[in-house]
Amino acid sequence: MTSIDILTGSALHSWLDAQWDFFSHPKETIDEAQRILLLKRSLEETRCEPDDYPSLNKYFRLWYVINEFDMALNVIETYTNSILNNVNNNDKIYISIQISLWKLSIYTKIKHENFLIQCDVLVEELFASPDKGAVLEDWSTFLNIVESAKQWNKYRELLRKRIAFEPRFAKENVNYLEGLLWIYSRDCFAFICDNQKEEAENSVKRLIETLQEDKFKDKVTTKTWLEQANFLVSLMPECIDEMIFHIKALVQDDWPDAIKKELNIKIAQIKAEQKYAQNQLEEAIEFGLAGHYEIARQGHHFTTKLMDWIIELGNYDKAAKIALDAIRFNLKDASNHAISLAYKHHEMNPSLYWHLIICWYNCFALYNKNRHSDYILTEEEQKIATHLLNEHLAKAKSIDASHVDIQSFEIYLLIQNKAQINEDEYHQKVLTLCERFFRDPNNYRSKEHISAYYRAKAHLLGIKTALESEFMPASEAFENFDLSQSLFVREEEWQKYSDHYESILTLKHKFEICGFEQYQRFYETGIGYYRDGNIHNFSMLIRNICCELSECDKKTPEEIKGRAQKILELSHLAIKVSPFAEHYSGIFDAYNLLQDFEKMVEAAENLWQIANTHGYSRYTPQNILDFFVPYLGQQGRFRELMIWLERLDQWYAYLSEDQQVAQQESYFSQIIHILSQVASQQPEETSIKLEKALTHNPPFWETNGRTALNISSIYFQLHNYDKAIEFGKLALALTTEYDTAEVIKKAERNLTIMQDTLANQNKTILKPWWKFW
């Protein structure tokens, strides 16, 4: 391309994309310095005239990444006005904000005298935005730029403007405390960075005093203190002991052991970081090992830090063992760090674990088992990965060929190679290796080991023998939870072994109970494995057990009562452990089994409140209303029924368009169901809502006999006997088709009553309306 070529429009976009592709995905033979040189030459030899925002963005960024900041600024200043003149007002506001951010990024690089002036311009642009929610991310970028420029006074000033920008942080609103804590904690950060230790201490003091104020008493929890302590621990480690004191002061004696244990783990992690910040490395590691559990997402980051601390102390083998757990459990951040440590240290600090980490990493890559990446290796990359796996497995065996972690890996590798081995030979090898491995009860048994072991037994010895053999659980509660959802219960195996339905369910239940007991033991004693600290998994396992207990077909009344009481017990435990809405649903299920309608109504109310406050994506109120709407009608509690009708509309309105399509029929049917209970008491309102429901929905009544019956009932109560008979006949035709004897009987009886009523309209109907059903 010569220097006289001028690129605009689509040609410019294509050229810019090609330059970005070259720079972002270089050939291995081209280093970064060469890339910058080649890209600079290409930019200098090509005249570009961006005429829209996307092309200006790409063109400016290309100059920026090769560190030609003056040129990048010149591009912005040359083309901005012409582009802004050709867009609508809303787009102009958005583009102006982005361009101001670009300028600020450049100013940080060239120490431009207009940096502070541009900050003020950007503040005005952000406040002028008509959509405050749309620019919150821009505020974050803005603060990050000012932070990188080390303009600490400006940073603190902008932080307050950012808080003032969002109405939810206003003094009269619920998030007012959150805004205050954000200011004080970030003030501390800015003062520390600006070497103003005394001011930083004052900021922390104000933060702690604020958390102790009486007016915030109901809003401050252990979580509030923990969040602040986690942010401040590396900045102001000397304040952590006081904060931990206040955290422990909030603990109640009646809290479940699970909650207390999780809190102790979080405190141990904070104490570890405090000790490290105070240059007390051995104490940091001691606390770190006590807090080394996957209790939350940040647990992955903590494991990364813990590995580094142990290496800093010189205990490479211990760090490598933790790194092996990180890669084997496929933890996103910690596993990436583990493999980088393994490649760095396996030669200078030889350890069997470093070699196994490289084996696991390449095994995951070869068989696409990395949960955090969809990347599939090329043929050449597969050869390299295979070579590395075999090389480092041989090196690990040269250190200790019988090591338990080598045995564990070889079983996993065999499972991945299943397709390359004769089926009988594969299952025999699995059975032999697993039986040898399982002899020592202290060996870590993964879900892959257990599922392959049971399937090998089923293949070689028969499913009956496999199911009746000695129960062999996984080592972790989480893994047993997973096995209860996967072993022999997936569709293909379920159909294959359908004659052994009850035995498979018994095995499934054993895994669930074993997992439950392992979680409980961990929280009561601290004995357990890495993921046994995951309180969410514990909670969901309880919910699964409750769901299965609620399936009471062919159960005696006494058995049903016992199951319902167990569901109540477990659901209340789960709510204490982790108050998800699913557990409130479990309480409703239990009272439904007991046919305790008053408790059912109360449970439905609690479920509605918790679902609205905390969210519940699987919540479908129309499905639970079926169980107690007739009861409320019989009790004459029509006002409650109308409230539920309003709630149904509220719930449906908040669904996405796709969700509304999926839920429309059940939503419509429940509206009709409720109207059939209130029509005689609320005739005018019922008439309006019925007309709206019938005209704004497809004719679901044409295929649903129960819905047609309920519409017939509504018209009868509204004294529209022709319509009542029309829908009654439709209901009868539909129910005959579906051969539901009880509904047919009701339909026939009701139709006779309606026809008699129409023939004798002047006679008084003495029978209460709900008795028709």
Image (cartoon, rainbow, N blue to C red):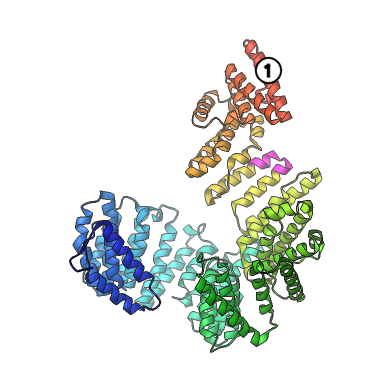
The residue singled out by tag 1 in the image is 753
Task: Give the camera-side residue of 344 and 751.
Answer: 344
> Can residue 287 be seen here?
no
- Compared with 617, 672 (above or below) is above
Q: Is 593 in the magenta?
A: yes
Splitting the image into 4 quarters, where does residue 726 fall? Answer: top right
Looking at the rendering, the stretch of residues picked out in magenta corresponds to 592-601
Towards the viewer: 259 or 420: 420
Q: Residue at x 68, y 84 (%)?
A: 401
Estimate the x, y position of residue 465 in percent, counting from the top left.
82, 62
Q: Is residue 511 magenta?
A: no
- Determine the residue positioned at 47% across, 62% down: 213
- Amino acid under label 1? Ile
Which residue is situated farthest in the left direction here? 4
Q: Give percent across and percent down for residue 289.
A: 60, 77
- Locate the C terminus and report the quarter of the image it occupies: top right
